[in-house]
Image (cartoon, helix red, strand yellow):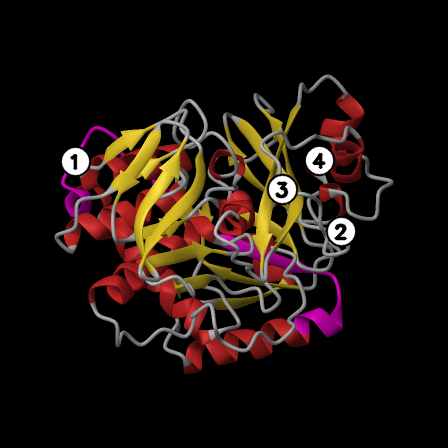
Amino acid sequence: MIGGGVVGAATAFHAARAGLRPLIVEARPQLCTLTTPVAAGGFRLQFDDLQELTLVRESAELFLHFEEVTRQTTYPLGLEQRGYLWLTTSAESAARQRALVEQLHAWGQTDVEVLSGEQTRERFPWVGENVVQSRFRAGDGFLDTKQLTFGLAHGAGADVVTGCRVTGFRTTGGRLSGVETTGGTVETDAAVIAAGPLSGAVGASAELTFPIVTIRRQKLILPLVPEVPDEGPMTIDEDTGAHWRPAQRGAWCFFTDPSTPPSEPTMDVPTDHRFAFELLDPASPTSIARVAPFWRDVWERGSAHWLLQAGQYTVTPDQRPIIGPTAIDGLHVNTGYSGHGIMLSAAGSRILVDTIVHSNTENPFRPDRVFEERAQPTL
């Protein structure tokens, strides 16, 4: 496995379960230090695509029984089912919410609710009077992304090599025979590129091109904010895409602006101080105070400390992952989760390993599929 984030660890875990002997090769000095720890750490069974919903259902089963499935207790997941609450102030968006929930019910996800504005405020009194409707699933929730990654790697019993960069691939008779690294050549007839935003660069060393771009996403961390409801759900302003979740006795805040242009993949993703003001200043059109007025009090108090982190989404044209064999026999790819890697990669990696062990595995995420353009999701 090339890459030591959640996708590489999940691939190693399923490889071990299939009777393979996994090795994780990570270019940085430690696992899980690039994009995975910057993620929101949420999972939800509220998707508008049945194939993605099926993946996250499978992943959620693993999350809910993590220690049992991984057969380890060193890295407990810290899972909390506090729900995902999507708020809207728009009649048009409210209609879309109702249509999505109706579709989810038809797909068997009958535990997703539509709440009127009044019903929403009855359950969540901090929601603004301007909210006309919400959709909510109580079984959605959060987990610790680093514990997830290390727990999967530990459960795999995988050998791990850090501080080791992949520089190329060796082939014999058109088939993979080794992975070349800064620490020497690893002889193998099967390898998986699972390097997140650096997957394209790794593939390029084998003259492979993947239909992916990298897009910066930032995370605003505000610890010790007493106004934040400790037991609150992931709360999303469906009209803007701004969202936040309780964390560290405060909150983590996000805004996945679909107009953000792609940027070059990098291990050093820069932050932009303006991001904090876009989320916190009530005068901003994407302020989290727009639908949760207590954030206005946080802004006016002005003394809350914050810090920024940044990572990169690895995005495909259809916003769905790329999972399966490449043009080089024995070399596979598992990337392109388009911001949903925490939720989808546990199940996606099982599919990847199935394609290695059983070549006829049904796989709608094959690298050679036709990619139809799909709008970037706001979350």
**Residues shaded magenta:** 68-94
Give the x, y percent position of residue 127.
65, 48
Q: Residues within 10 Å of mark 1 (few under 14, many from 20)?
A: some
Between 361 and 171, the one nearer to me in the picture: 171
Give the x, y percent position of residue 159.
23, 33
Give the x, y percent position of residue 150.
31, 33
Q: Residues within 10 Å of mark 3 (few under 14, many from 20)?
A: many
Q: Which mark is residue 295?
A: 4
Mark-to-mark CA distance, 1 and 3: 34 Å
Mark positioned earlier in the residue sequence (1 or 3) = 1
Q: Which mark is residue 72?
A: 1
Amino acid carrying label 4: it is Trp
Residue that carries the numbered disc 2 in the rendered image = 261
Residue that carries the numbered disc 3 in the rendered image = 265
Q: Is residue 83 visible?
A: no
User: Going 50% across and 54% down the picture, which residue do you hit?
Assistant: 340
Mark positioned earlier in the residue sequence (4 or 2) = 2
Mark-to-mark CA distance, 4 and 3: 33 Å
Q: Give the structural element (helix, strand or loop) at label 2.
A: loop
Mark-to-mark CA distance, 1 and 4: 40 Å
Amino acid carrying label 2: it is Pro
